[in-house]
Image: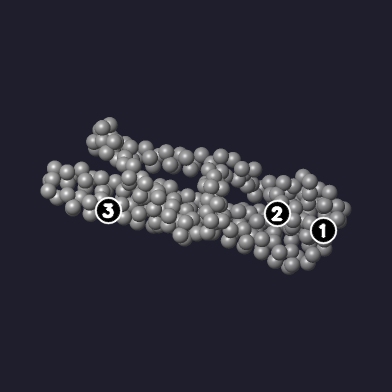
Amino acid sequence: MKKFDLMTPIGLFLGITVLLVAVFAISGPTGLGYFFDVASVFIVIGGVLAALIVNFSFKELLKVPKMFMEVFNTKDQNIGDLTQTFVDLSSKARREGLLALEASLDEVEDPFIRKGILLAVDGIEPDVIKDIMMAEVVAMEDRHNKARSVFEKAGEYAPAWGMSGTLIALVLMLQNMESPETLGPSMSLAMITTLYGVVLANLVFIPMSSKLANKTEEEVFMKQIIIEGVIGVQSGQNPKILEEKLSAFHRSQNKSKTVSGDQDVEA
């Protein structure tokens, strides 16, 4: 089940607040107007959009709104509940046989689990089941990476288009050197476009791309657990052994996160 992810809007709000507080602290409330320019917004947003249209197909760009919404959603994935599902399925398979599992699939919400159990019920060999399900995982990962790359590229293009806007403003400014009193405001306006590009890249596009990458990694991990669970049920593993095996994935994930966090602190 998907839930609204508060961390994304909190992060965006905090980033915008930091910028606004900095402006107020330096120049007061009146300084806020200096940081808004329609032409600069048009150059950065329009330029990034144009570059994305050149870089990606129309079909790939149509996926962007869906991926954008994914940044604000989180899946309630509980390894403990998933483990218990396979323990129950394993117990029933050992008592009543694999064919009895087909009647229990209505209670299983995850289509990936249902597909795996149906393959097991059909008597497919464990290696073949694993190959089939892993092929689906690889395809899913590839789809996610292609959609995520749109945000990644946007993060690369935004600063460059910001600099392009700055160069345009500088060229126009240098053509009007006979009015020294206009040089300061013109230079300030030239810098705004670069500011827009940098903020969009580092507060919106790149963080969203990284978050989508993390979500894909978590989903792949969960599907790997499901595959191991299906193979365990199909091969008739003892429910207790299967529970311990799947729980080991959870422990390894927590250990990996702890090690990663320790490395970040040391760095």
Residue 104 vs residue 56, the one in the foreground: 56
Check whether the beta carbons of the residues at disc 1 and disc 2 lie within 8 A of each other: no
Mark 1 is surrounded, within 10 Å at the Cα level, by few (under 14), some (14 to 19) or many (20 or more) other residues, namely some
**Residue 263: where, in percent of width, then height?**
44, 57
Q: Which mark is residue 207?
A: none
The spot of residue 203 in percent (x, y) is 40, 47
The quadrant of the rendering that contains the N terminus is top right
Reading the image, the residue beneath label 1 is 121
| Category of crowding for the residue at label 3, using alpha-carbon neighbours closer than 10 angstroms: few (below 14), some (14–19), many (at least 20) | few
Assign a secondary structure to mark 3. Answer: helix
Q: Quadrant of residue 182?
A: top left
What amino acid is at disc 3? Ile
Q: Residue sitting at 33 percent across and 46 percent down?
A: 40
Instruction: Kindly check if marks 3 and 1 are in contact, taking CB atoms under 8 A apart as contact.
Output: no
Q: What is the distance, in whole Å, between disc 3 and disc 1 at their CAs? A: 66 Å
Residue at the far top in the pictured view: 29
Q: Is residue 9 above or below residue 259?
A: above
Under tag 2, what secondary structure?
Answer: helix
Name the front one of labels 3 and 2. Answer: 3
* Residue type (three-letter) at the residue carrying disc 2: Phe
Check disc 1 and report its element: helix, strand or loop. Answer: helix
Q: Which numbered dot is residue 168?
A: 3
Residue at horizontal 79%, vertical 56%? 118
Q: What amino acid type should be assigned to the residue bearing mark 1?
A: Val
Q: Residues within 10 Å of mark 2 (few under 14, many from 20)?
A: some
Quadrant holding the C terminus: bottom left
Residue under label 2: 112
Pick the front one: 23 or 56: 56
Q: Nearer the viewer, mark 3 or mark 1?
A: 3
Report the Cα–Cα distance between label 3 and label 2: 53 Å
